[in-house]
């Protein structure tokens, strides 16, 4: 089988994970900028992180024949500090020209605060002015439903955006229909505890269709599985889904969305 | 999938998870101290399991969700799973 891992935080994974993903049929890995598990000391920390995402990590992936792509932003958790957010936003344009940068992400909300909303709006403006794809993170657990609705309202209010160039990630049963009905792409994240299991993900696709959906592992430094996407393919086979349906969902769908950026090629 | 196939594939796993939930409630009951809002939300959500209505997973997620619409004034701690 072949698949694309469209959302993985490889900077926090070991090199053996690249080997396992390539062995399982991964054709490309995409890495959005995110929270490091602790708040960085200043904007210089983000500059170093963006260099890691655009220079070092692609070389590590290339050792296993994996193209590596990146998304840039200041994550919503650290965006609560608006001075820091402005400094990081100002440095992003210099990295947008890098050959592996696909767009702005993963932006969004964490605790649904005023500051987070203000910085989200600035990221959306940056993406619109530079013609970038957008990858949106939705909040965790009890904050997800409210945050997803706030994000959808904010995106819908910006007339410059094409919903087909925006993916809203970490959708679950109570948010997926909202995202799809608004015309956006939706991401479903496969986690061992929070977010979604493979069985629930397939349930959602059987109910709502898979036209504008991708699946991802969002593997990071927490409990997560870098092989969650191919394990979901196994679950689909158990249910009798054909190899063509699995390929369309796990390879063709992310390729169709990501290839809207001319830098993405396999 | 037909219903018998769903049962073949998922019954044992679902049975195991249900027993885990029962054991969690027993553990909670045996423990000392007061319950908080999470236990109350959990008990409300459990009622959805036996509902005859479809979309149980969606309704359980909504039972654990913050349904307010106003923006938070200050950052809180990490999400804990119930509002």
Image: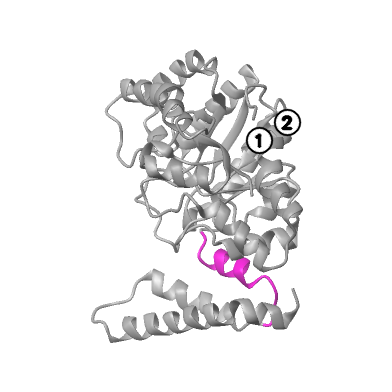
Left or right, residue B55 beside residue B70: right
Chain label for disc 1: A
- Colour convention of the picture: one colour
- The residue labelled by disc 2 is A162
Where is residue A78? Give x, y as percent: 38, 35
Camera sees residue B19: yes
SS for tag 1? strand
SS for tag 2? loop
Where is residue B82? Give x, y as percent: 45, 64
Does A167 appear above or below A181?
above
Task: Say which quarter of the image contains residue A131.
Answer: top right
Question: Residue A166, which numbered label?
Answer: 1
Start and end of the magenta stretch?
B52-65
Is B64 a magenta residue? yes
Residue placed most toward the observer, B50 or A211: A211
Camera sees residue B69: no
Q: Residue at x 47, y 35 (%)?
A: A64
Chain label for disc 2: A
What is the C-alpha distance between the residues marked 1 and 2?
Answer: 7 Å
């Amino acid at each position: 089988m072949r698949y694309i891992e469209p959302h993985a935080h490889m900077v926090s994974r070991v090199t053996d994970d690249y080997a396992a993903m390539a062995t399982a049929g991964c054709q490309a890995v995409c890495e959005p900028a995110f929270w490091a598990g602790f708040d960085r000391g200043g904007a210089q920390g983000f500059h170093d992180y963006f260099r890691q995402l655009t220079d070092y990590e692609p070389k590590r992936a290339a050792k296993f024949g994996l193209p590596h792509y990146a998304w840039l932003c200041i994550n919503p958790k650290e965006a609560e500090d608006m001075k820091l957010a402005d400094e990081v936003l100002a440095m992003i344009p210099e990295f947008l020209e890098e050959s592996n940068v696909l767009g702005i992400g993963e932006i969004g909300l964490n605790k649904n605060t005023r500051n987070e909303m203000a910085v989200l709006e600035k990221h959306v403006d940056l993406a619109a002015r530079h013609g970038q794809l957008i990858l949106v993170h939705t909040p965790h657990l009890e904050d997800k439903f409210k945050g997803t609705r706030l994000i959808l309202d904010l995106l819908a209010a910006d007339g410059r955006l094409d919903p087909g160039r925006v993916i809203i990630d970490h959708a679950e049963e109570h948010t997926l229909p909202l995202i799809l009905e608004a015309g956006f792409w939706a991401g479903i994240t496969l986690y061992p505890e929070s977010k979604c299991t493979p069985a629930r993900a397939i349930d959602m696709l059987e109910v709502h269709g898979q036209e504008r959906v991708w699946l991802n592992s969002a593997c990071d430094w927490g409990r997560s599985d870098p092989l969650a996407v191919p394990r979901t393919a196994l679950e689909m086979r158990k249910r009798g889904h054909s190899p063509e349906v699995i390929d369309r969902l796990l390879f063709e769908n992310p390729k169709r969305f990501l290839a809207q950026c001319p830098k993405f090629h396999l | 999938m037909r219903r018998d196939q769903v049962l073949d594939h998922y019954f044992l796993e679902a049975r195991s998870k249900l027993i885990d939930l029962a054991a969690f409630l027993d553990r909670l009951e045996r423990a000392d101290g007061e319950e908080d809002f999470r236990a109350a939300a959990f008990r409300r959500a459990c009622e959805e399991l036996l509902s005859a209505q479809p979309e149980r997973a969606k309704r359980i997620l909504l039972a654990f969700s913050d349904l307010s619409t106003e923006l938070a004034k200050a950052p809180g701690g990490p999400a804990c799973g119930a509002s």
